[in-house]
């Protein structure tokens, strides 16, 4: 009997979710979105967890196989009491994205307060200690994925300002002051990502030099927003130039744990790990758990090639 064709390029792990509320040693309201990195032989997730009071903090989860994780009891990055950050992190810190960079790791996260959203930047060498470096965006900016190497001698990042619903790229000499802004990826009327798009996973450098960017796309419907995942390939030397983009999503909410939760019909990723040609995508589902999907670069490329030139 022939096997059924998979509806998505990214195949879900049969043991999903990898982390849910029952896996925690403490009570919490919800779990959403996780940055991901592999340090030597340990898989690390940086998970957003909302406390019973409604404040969000970032917790580390560790695994030796990438499937079964143990979540720390205490936050790795929590709302700051430092006067430079407290005002802008009073509601919480969330959506941590981890970027390996030379001999260290940079973490971008979203700081939320009554004043809106801003991108925060922190650094760790060992995931035991972490240092905040600053708030590095204007107000009401989300995303904040950092490239894992300099582009033409400068740091580069992606972000999604609240207005416009599109992804921008910018550059910096010192990780503090950013400029050279260019619009990178817009939403597309009539497509699955018609309403808004945003950077999801920090860009991944492939063997041939191109950049792979996993992004999220939103389409507003009568039942509310529908979140899906797509992919683009960017030029090796000028990542502001899109080479190819998926016309169809590579992952859509289909399972009950993706459709039913605190935010229905939502798939949102902040982290992926590339092992040879296999991509492990860790994603939040319905703002209620963390799941795992996998695919190959070749499969993503095949889908992107079909839509080359349609940006």
Image: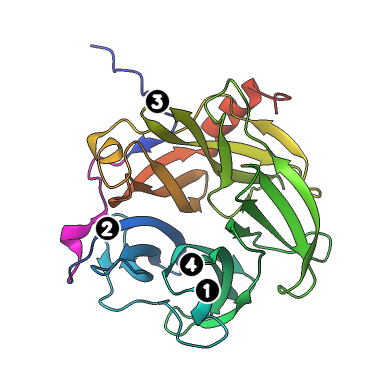
Compare marks 3 and 4 and give the one earlier in the sequence.
Answer: 4
* Image mark for residue 222: 3
Q: Nearer the viewer, residue 42 or 285?
A: 285
Q: Quadrant of the C terminus?
A: top right
* Image mark for residue 30: 2
Q: Which residue is mark 1?
A: 88
Q: Which residues are magenta?
A: 13-25
Distance in Å between CA atoms under marks 2 and 3: 25 Å
Compare marks 1 and 2 and give the one earlier in the sequence.
Answer: 2
* Image mark for residue 114: 4
- Residue reaching furthest to the bottom: 82
Q: Is residue 56 visible?
A: yes
In the image, is residue 131 above or below residue 267?
below
For the residues labelled 3 and 4, say whether their Cβ atoms are less than 8 Å apart. Answer: no
Question: Which residue lies at the image location 60% right of the left edge and 32% below the top edge?
Answer: 301
Local secondary structure at mark 1: helix
- How packed is label 3: few (under 14 Cα within 10 Å), some, or many (20 or more)? few
In the image, is residue 239 above or below residue 153?
above
């Amino acid at each position: 009997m022939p096997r059924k064709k998979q509806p998505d390029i990214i195949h879900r792990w049969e043991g999903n979710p990898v982390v849910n509320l029952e896996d925690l040693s403490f009570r919490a309201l919800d779990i959403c979105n996780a940055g991901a990195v592999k340090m030597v032989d340990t898989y690390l997730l940086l998970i957003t967890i909302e406390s019973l009071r409604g404040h969000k903090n970032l917790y580390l989860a560790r695994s030796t196989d990438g499937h079964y994780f143990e979540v720390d009891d205490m936050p790795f990055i929590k709302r700051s009491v430092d006067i430079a950050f407290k005002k802008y992190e009073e509601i919480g810190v969330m959506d941590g994205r981890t970027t390996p960079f030379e001999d260290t790791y940079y973490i971008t996260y979203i700081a939320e307060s009554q004043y809106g959203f801003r991108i925060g930047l922190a650094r760790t060498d060992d995931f035991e200690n972490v240092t905040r470096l600053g708030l590095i965006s204007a107000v009401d900016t989300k995303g904040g994925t950092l490239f894992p190497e300099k582009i033409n001698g400068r740091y580069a990042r992606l972000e999604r300002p609240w207005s416009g619903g599109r992804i921008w790229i910018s550059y910096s000499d010192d990780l503090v002051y950013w400029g050279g802004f260019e619009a990178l990826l817009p939403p597309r009327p009539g497509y699955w990502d018609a309403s808004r798009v945003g950077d999801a996973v920090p860009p991944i450098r492939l063997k041939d030099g191109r950049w792979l960017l996993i992004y999220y796309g939103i389409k507003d419907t009568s039942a509310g927003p529908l979140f899906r995942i797509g992919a683009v390939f960017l030029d090796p030397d000028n990542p502001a130039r899109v080479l190819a983009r998926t016309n169809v999503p590579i992952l859509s909410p289909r399972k009950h744990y993706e459709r039913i939760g605190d935010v229905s019909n939502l798939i949102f990723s902040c982290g992926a790990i590339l092992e040879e040609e296999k991509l492990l995508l860790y994603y939040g589902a319905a703002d209620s758990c963390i799941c795992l999907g996998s695919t190959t670069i070749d499969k993503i490329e095949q889908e992107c090639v079909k839509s080359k030139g349609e940006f």
